Image (cartoon, rainbow, N blue to C red):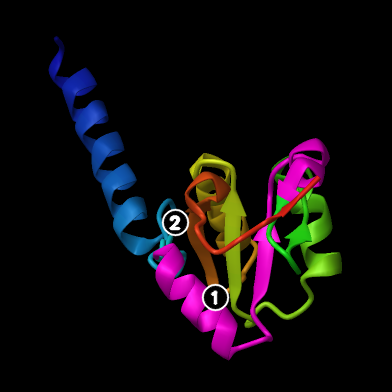
């Protein structure tokens, strides 16, 4: 490998590392947080202002959902969040079926500037009652 080629690679890697550290690629302000469903339930019982956001499909939601949850399917979240979840400081607990989509949704909301979005996993492990079709 030629010396100039190695130097170019070294410089490129150095710049990428500096960009990463300075936050151009990675931002420490965006933080993914998962909390237990027990904690989420306790907080929802004591604070009625918490939004419980269900990010499953309409069909899944219609089959079974948690009372008073708000449905915005994951594939519609980017387009609907700022219209329907106006307060970016409000606490939002996010649930899906098994926990995969709720993690993605939490990351999406964080990237949109929501400060209190929390993944609480999937409805399949929710033990506090649901509304079934």
Q: Quadrant of the N terminus?
A: top left
Answer left or right for 1 relative to 94.
left
**Residue ID at (19%, 29%):** 7
Image quarter of the C terminus:
top right
Picture quadrant of residue 116: bottom right
9, 107: nearer the viewer: 107
Closer-to-camera residue (46/23): 46
Residue 14, relative to residue 112: is it above or below? above
Residue 93 can be seen, yes or no: yes
Residue sitting at x 49%, y 45%: 99
* Element assignment for label 1: loop
Q: Does 48 lie within the magenta span? A: yes
Where is residue 63? Give x, y as percent: 77, 41
Q: Quadrant of residue 114?
A: bottom right
Among all residues in the image, which is located at the extreme bottom? 46
Question: Which disc, if any, is residue 24?
Answer: 2
Between residues 58 and 17, which one lies in front from this camera angle?
A: 58
Q: Which SS class for mark 2?
A: loop
Q: Picture coordinates of residue 119 (x, y %)?
A: 50, 59
Q: Is residue 31 visible?
A: no
Q: Which residue is mark 1?
A: 116
Q: Which residues are magenta?
A: 36-64
Evaluate if marks 1 and 2 touch, with contact meaning CB atoms under 8 Å apart.
no
């Amino acid at each position: 490998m030629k010396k100039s080629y190695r130097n170019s690679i070294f410089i490129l890697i150095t710049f990428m590392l500096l960009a990463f550290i300075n936050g151009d690629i990675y931002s420490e302000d965006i933080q993914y947080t998962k909390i237990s469903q027990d904690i989420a339930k306790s907080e929802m019982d004591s604070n009625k202002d918490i939004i419980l956001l269900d990010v499953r499909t309409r069909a899944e939601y219609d089959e079974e959902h948690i009372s008073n949850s708000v449905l915005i399917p994951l594939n519609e979240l980017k387009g609907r969040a700022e219209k329907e979840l106006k307060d970016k400081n409000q606490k939002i607990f996010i649930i899906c079926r098994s926990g995969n989509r709720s993690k993605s949704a939490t990351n999406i909301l964080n990237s949109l500037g929501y400060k209190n979005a929390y993944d609480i996993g999937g409805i399949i492990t929710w033990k506090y009652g649901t509304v079934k079709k």
